[in-house]
Image (cartoon, helix red, strand yellow):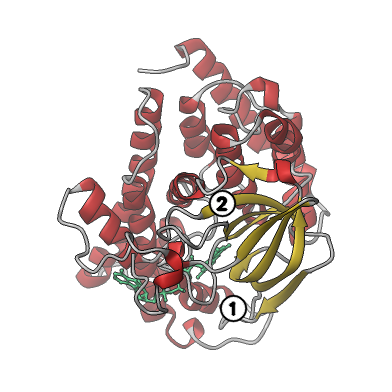
Amino acid sequence: MSDMDQRTMLELSERIEGFFEELPPLLAGVEGMVERGKAYRKALYDAGLAGLEVPSEYGGGGYGPTSKALFARLSRGRVPAEDDIFTIGVGMAMPTLLEFGDEHLRRRYVEPALRGEEIWCQMYSEPGAGSDLAGLQTRALRTPGGWVLSGQKIWTSRAEVAQFAICLARTDVDVPKHKGITMFVVPMDQPGVTVRPILQITGASEFNEVFLDDVLVPVDHVVGEVDGGWPVAVALMQNERSAIGAGGGRRPVPFESLRDLVHDRDHAAEPRIREALANCYIGQRLSELLTELEADSVDAGVPLGAETSLGKLWRSTNGRVAADLVSELAFASGAAWKPGDDRENWAFAVLDACALSLGGGTDEVQKNTIAEKVLGLPRDPYRTDKMPFRDLTVGTQRD
Ligand SMILES: Cc1cc2nc3c(=O)[nH]c(=O)nc-3n(C[C@H](O)[C@H](O)[C@H](O)COP(=O)(O)OP(=O)(O)OC[C@H]3O[C@@H](n4cnc5c(N)ncnc54)[C@H](O)[C@@H]3O)c2cc1C
């Protein structure tokens, strides 16, 4: 079955178990999202458990894909929430650099990300390009000094704390929209990059608008081919969906908390509530099993593909079912709270659940992907992917 023999698997399992048992004192007294996230990552790296599947020459464990699934399984529910600030860097950008980046990009960026020294964000979405990502309008022009980027990004999670961004920009407007896109690594701390936080319904502010005004990017910070960024962008989104499906990023309310809530509110005997709770358990288990299936496929030499949309869709469906149950049981506590009181967590869970259905691609987009690429159903008839980008008008760029 595996790229690891049983003995290595056992030894690794024991180390992972030992690490999580010893973790609480290492984080005791560390305050703040970034500080706690970094402290966790450093501890993980020092224990030799960061990026188990990443080749050892780039600072990883060199154990191959199965080790990733093993870690995901044994660490479930035990990774501090603050590690989310590394989901984009470690879960999405680094696998993409490892697959498509030049050697100097891999050597420069992978290990610091695994160590938790550098935080990344993803500058894909724009005001006119979300589901229709290939309609993006941020321009990159080649100059003697490097690439110069101008445009606006939006919903950029963690840009306020990130040192680097994986960024898509248009490098040719005379070809169909999927063809003239290039992926760049953009250092965030430089003139021309303006980050403005967006306030969310939960009161949190985890994503931003990012304005790029003549931002200079070194020539050697292109990932993949110039004008050939679309397949790289898709590969990153598959890593994103896989990372979200495997538990990275925001998390639905876990089954165990829901079960406790059902008991606390004395609803355990009600068939309808029991059924909803069972559905939450099934959803959570399905997400876990899909992650393991994915790892088995990668292990067998099949790269990540459109199937990653299944895990992402399950996770958001599960998040919504869980939020509905919480809002029914927690009642007013699920909608109103005073900052700092116990009810805040339930209200947050309810208000935040819709984000699971949007971030990483909406549920509808996942369903389109599953329909077209997994089930082989006919494609959207209103496609515009043969026309040069400059001839498209806003509102026709649907695919
Ligand atoms: C919590 C969160 C974090 C995010 N973080 C990031 C980030 O770090 N970086 C980043 O680049 N982006 C990020 N995003 C943006 C996210 O990827 C987009 O919100 C998402 O792709 C949808 O794009 P949109 O908001 O422009 O909606 P639109 O694309 O305008 O969609 C509006 C509605 O129309 C539906 N729709 C659109 N096209 C179709 C179609 N062809 N078929 C069926 N239905 C369709 C959609 O499903 C949706 O319901 C984040 C979003 C959230 C909520």
Q: Viewer-proximal residue, 236 or 18?
A: 236
Where does the image place residue 314, in percent across and percent down from the top left?
A: 33, 56
Quadrant position of residue 363: bottom left
Tag of residue 182: 2
Query: In screen coordinates, is 112 left or right of 250?
Result: right
- Give the total number of marks visible in the rendering: 2
Query: Which residue is found at the position 44% from the left and 51% from the top?
Result: 241
Residue type at the position of mark 2: Thr
Quadrant position of residue 114: top right
Query: In screen coordinates, is 150 left or right of 329?
Result: right
Query: In screen coordinates, is 352 left or right of 183?
Result: left
185, above or below 158, in the image: above
Query: In screen coordinates, is 318 left or right of 180?
Result: left
Q: Viewer-proximal residue, 344 or 33?
A: 33
Reading the image, the residue beneath label 1 is 344
Where does the image place residue 353, in percent across and percent down from the top left?
A: 45, 71
239, above or below 321, in the image: above
Q: Earlier in the sequence, mark 2 or mark 1?
A: 2
Where does the image place residue 395, in percent across and percent down from the top left?
A: 37, 79
Q: Viewer-proximal residue, 226 or 254?
A: 226
Specify the quarter for ligand 1: bottom left
Query: Which residue is found at the position 35% from the left and 61% from the top?
Result: 318
